């Protein structure tokens, strides 16, 4: 009988190592199935000891050692990966098992006994003493590539030819499945049979087939994958590319909230691979590393985004002269409210031009629905969800033609035929612009025009989105209205692009929000071939000026100064502690955490809104000098927080 020690592969907060007994002979490194609470989970064996050597400790144990379920496969994970996972776990103040579970797809764990094991790579890391601009002459290290999509794809094609000539393979990682598919289509021509794609939407059968082909192909290969396939069955991969490095989908949405970019880069460096960080506009953190010579330029850098399209910026505010004349107007209709304009004259002209010339037009908007919020004109209260107190969004039902309210936080729906919950007034007014409202406005003004929509409410599946895109491209003169989820499906180029409004994003308490806006506009601007139009009621915001001029260098300096002033990353590491529950209970728990973290300053603040079922959320923020993290004492405290407390390192948003 043997006692085995395992690393449990679970996102839940559990001990970093657990013990089980088995009569089987189990090698260290094996993947096994073990019981944990009421479930069966995967685990990695780290130690095997005869039970007779532990009789004393077993008798004194306060818990019962359970029996091992079954052995999935023998040695599977490279030792270097386990060691890297330990360091990543330290950075994110979590367990090794939680890291591995986040970075290794379920398909791999479930089929470990049927597929080839990931291959180790033992080359040493050689950083260049002098930076170089030519990809084909680079030594191992980290390199930044900032340029338009077409230029970057051209660089990757060139790199593929060079790597194949050296009999080397290459891996490219993207933040989303759709980005992976797009890149696969752009690179596939000429290397069919040697390029593969891996992502979580593959069927189990297709995954096994693809994995085995990657392993068995004698010729060097290109693998395009999402971050849950950080390990691959090849030992000849010299170059690892992190594409769309500025995307906001790299951080996992479940605990332990690991940033895939950090993990991929760390593991690749430990394996002696050259890493490229690439996007049309790189993250502030990456550009800061470049300025500090921590990383190097991987190709000639582009600090200005170029487009062949007309740049049209429209100030949607009413002219002051118009407001003064209205105020002094003696007309009996002067008290009638001014109509809120959704479209400028310039946008209407562009819609008509698109129709007349049989071209294609994409209209971007931040919010879905008809109106993002509704207020009472009498008491000025905002209409909120009755379940979770979040502001509700107004929608128009396509089936009944009647309005309804929907909460984007908890999903609750109810009829919009209601009075104000605070004062009983019927005088409720919708505010803001949603995609449904834009579609309604176009249909009313341009009868018969073909309109397509892509947003979370109108597009329930990838197949639905792809069908909509196909119909849109087959109808010249048509218009596609969409939120950010539509952008990856559009392809490279489109005739006209109009941004109805990004103003609402500036009200979000997110220190990265200017970067998000800059990235959206820069990407859309590079995709348009004839016209790019931006409407705003905040024309003095610098981000709009920088974006519409393609001025990346001044924008970077502006953001970096802002980050330095408030000690945000890259000048610090932010640690956000969050608790959800009843207000009194979570306040008490946060107070106890403050007492426990007495050596550290924690800024306590409430979340923006209540959560589902009337619960509240409270946050605690700790700022640590970037050179002092990970702090062993603080990591230990964070790891020992209760199960219902979440910890995020460098979160996307603070509130």
Image (cartoon, rainbow, N blue to C red):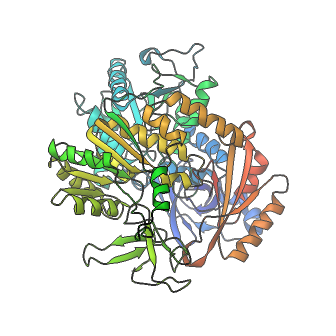
Q: In the visual, does 391 lie left or right of 168?
A: right
The residue shown at (36%, 57%) is 342
The picture places residue 432, in percent across and down from the top left corner, at 44, 62
Q: Residue furthest bottom?
A: 424
Quadrant in the picture for the C terminus: bottom right
What residue do we see at 45% from left, 83% from top? 426
- Residue displayed at 22% across by 57% down: 451
Task: Classify residue 102 as left or right of residue 576.
Answer: left
| In the foreground, 293 or 284 | 284
- Residue 270 visible? The answer is no
| Occupied quadrant, residue 256 | bottom right
> Measured along the vertical axis of the image, is residue 655 above or below residue 649?
below
Q: Left or right: 83 with respect to 158?
A: right
Q: Above or below — where is 197 with respect to 411?
A: above
Q: Where is residue 152 in the image (x, y as percent from the top left)?
A: 38, 28
Q: Can residue 461 be seen in this view?
A: yes
**Front position in the image: 428 or 546:** 428
Q: Position of residue 385 (x, y in %)?
A: 50, 76
* Quadrant occupied by the N terminus: bottom right
Q: Residue furthest front?
A: 330
The x, y position of residue 244, in whole percent, is 43, 38
Rendered position, 11 above or below 549: below
The one nearer the camera, 248 or 67, is: 248
């Amino acid at each position: 009988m043997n006692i085995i020690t395992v690393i449990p592969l679970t996102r839940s907060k559990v001990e970093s190592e657990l013990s089980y007994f088995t009569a089987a002979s189990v090698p260290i490194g094996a993947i096994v199935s073990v019981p944990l609470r009421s479930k069966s989970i995967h685990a990695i064996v780290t130690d095997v000891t005869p039970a007779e050597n532990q009789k004393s400790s077993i008798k004194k144990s306060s818990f019962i050692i359970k029996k091992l379920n079954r052995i999935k496969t023998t040695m599977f994970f490279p030792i270097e990966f386990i060691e890297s996972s330990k360091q990543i776990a330290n950075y994110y103040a979590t367990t090794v098992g939680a890291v591995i579970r986040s970075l290794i797809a379920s398909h791999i764990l479930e089929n470990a006994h049927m597929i080839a094991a990931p291959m180790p790579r033992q080359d040493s890391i050689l950083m260049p003493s002098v930076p170089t601009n030519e990809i084909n002459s680079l030594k191992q290290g980290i390199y930044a590539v900032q340029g338009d999509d077409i230029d970057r794809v051209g660089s990757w094609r060139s790199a593929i030819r060079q790597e194949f000539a050296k009999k080397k393979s290459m891996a490219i990682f993207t933040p989303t499945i759709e980005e992976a598919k797009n890149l696969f289509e752009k690179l596939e021509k000429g290397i069919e049979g040697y390029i593969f794609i891996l992502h979580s939407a593959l069927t189990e059968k297709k995954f096994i087939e693809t994995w085995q082909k990657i392993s068995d192909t004698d010729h060097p290969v290109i693998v395009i994958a999402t971050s849950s396939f950080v390990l691959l069955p090849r030992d000849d991969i010299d170059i690892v590319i992190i594409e769309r490095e500025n995307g906001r989908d790299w951080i996992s949405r479940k605990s332990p909230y690991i940033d895939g970019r950090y993990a991929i880069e760390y593991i690749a460096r430990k394996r002696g691979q050259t890493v490229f960080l690439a996007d049309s506009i790189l993250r502030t953190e990456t550009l800061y590393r470049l300025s500090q010579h921590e990383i190097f330029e991987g190709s000639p850098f582009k600090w200005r985004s170029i487009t062949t399209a007309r740049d049209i910026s429209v100030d949607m505010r009413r002219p002051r002269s118009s407001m003064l004349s209205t105020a002094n107007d003696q007309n009996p209709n002067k008290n009638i409210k001014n109509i809120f304009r959704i479209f400028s004259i310039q946008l209407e002209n562009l819609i008509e031009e698109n129709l007349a010339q049989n071209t294609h037009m994409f209209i971007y908007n931040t919010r879905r629905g008809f109106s993002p919020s509704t207020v009472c004109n009498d008491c000025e209260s905002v209409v909120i969800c009755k379940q979770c107190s979040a502001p509700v969004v107004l929608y128009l039902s396509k089936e009944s033609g009647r309005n309804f309210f929907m909460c984007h936080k908890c999903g609750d729906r109810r009829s919009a035929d209601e009075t104000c919950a605070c004062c009983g007034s019927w005088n409720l007014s919708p505010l803001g612009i949603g995609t449904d409202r834009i579609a309604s406005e176009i249909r009313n003004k341009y009868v018969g025009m073909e309109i397509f929509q892509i947003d979370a409410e109108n597009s329930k599946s990838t197949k639905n989105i792809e069908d909509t895109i196909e119909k849109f491209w087959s109808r010249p003169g048509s218009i596609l209205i969409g939120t950010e989820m539509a952008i990856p499906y559009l392809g490279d180029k489109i005739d006209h692009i109009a941004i109805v409004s990004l103003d609402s994003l500036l009200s979000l308490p997110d220190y990265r929000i200017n970067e998000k806006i800059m990235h959206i506009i820069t990407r859309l601007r590079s995709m348009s071939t004839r016209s790019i139009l931006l409407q705003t009621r905040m024309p003095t915001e610098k981000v709009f000026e920088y974006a519409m001029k393609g001025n990346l260098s001044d924008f970077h300096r502006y953001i970096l100064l802002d980050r330095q002033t408030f000690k945000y990353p890259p000048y610090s590491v932010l640690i956000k502690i969050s608790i959800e529950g009843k207000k009194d209970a979570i306040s008490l728990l946060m107070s106890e955490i403050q007492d426990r973290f007495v050596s550290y300053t924690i800024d306590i603040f409430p979340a923006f809104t209540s959560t589902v079922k009337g619960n509240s959320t409270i946050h605690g923020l700790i700022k640590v000098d970037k050179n002092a993290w990970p702090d062993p004492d603080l990591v230990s405290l964070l790891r020992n927080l209760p199960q219902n407390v979440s910890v995020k390192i460098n979160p996307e948003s603070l509130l």
